[in-house]
Image: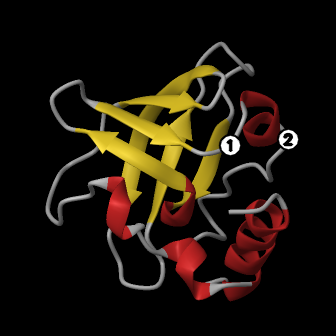
Amino acid sequence: MSDSMWGYQAESGHQAGTDLTGFKVEASDGSIGKVDKHSEDVGAAYIVVDTGVWIFGKQVLLPAGVISAIDIAERTVHVGRTKNEIKNAPEFDKDKHVGDPGYHEQVGGYYGDLGA
């Protein structure tokens, strides 16, 4: 797994300290939900997306490396993955995502295998 998967891309427009909670999340082929929580931790940055009714209230963990653009004015986060790729991702596990490096490897590996 590449460590860059867990960091914001320079061209994403991410500004440190920006609260992304509540931002809309757009996949490459349409809306997938809203940011429920996010982290800027170096080497472990991510967003958790609440997909709402789209996939029956599932939450997914997206490494910051899949974020292609952040539009502060429109309060929108764009990710470089399709809705289907996100729907098939490992489900967010609030108990494992903190302190379980294997979980981050699983999630990072899933998105990394799809290509950056």
Rendered-image quadrant of the N terminus: bottom right
Compared across the picture, whether 80 is left or right of 10 comes to: right
Q: Which residue is drawn at 28% across and 45% down?
A: 20
Compared across the picture, whether 45 is left or right of 102 comes to: left
Mark 1 residue element: loop
The location of residue 28, given as percent across then percent down, is 62, 31
Q: Residue at x 59, y 54 (%)?
A: 62
Characterize the local packing of mark 2: few (<14), some (14-19) or many (20 or more) Cα atoms within 10 angstroms: few
> In which image quadrant can residue 99 be found?
bottom right
User: Which dot marks residue 96?
Assistant: none
Compared across the picture, whether 93 is left or right of 50 comes to: right
Label pair 2/1, CB-CB below 8 angstroms: no
User: Which dot marks residue 88?
Assistant: 2
N-terminal of the two: label 2 or label 1? 1
The location of residue 57, given as percent across then percent down, is 65, 24
Visible residue check, residue 50: yes
The location of residue 6, given as percent across then percent down, is 53, 74
Residue that extends furthest to the front in the rendered view of this protein: 11
Q: Which residue is drawn at 34% across and 69% down?
A: 10
Q: Nearer the viewer, mark 2 or mark 1?
A: 1
Q: In the rendered structure, which amino acid carries the disc numbered 1?
A: Arg
> In which image quadrant can residue 42 be found?
bottom left
Rendered-image quadrant of the C terminus: bottom right
Q: In the rendered structure, which amino acid carries the disc numbered 2?
A: Asn
From the image, tell me which residue sits under label 1. 81
Question: How far, Cα to Cα, is label 2 from label 1?
Answer: 11 Å
> In which image quadrant can residue 110 be found?
bottom right
In the image, is residue 33 above or below residue 53?
below
The location of residue 34, given as percent across then percent down, is 44, 29
Closer to the camera in the image, 107 or 31 = 31
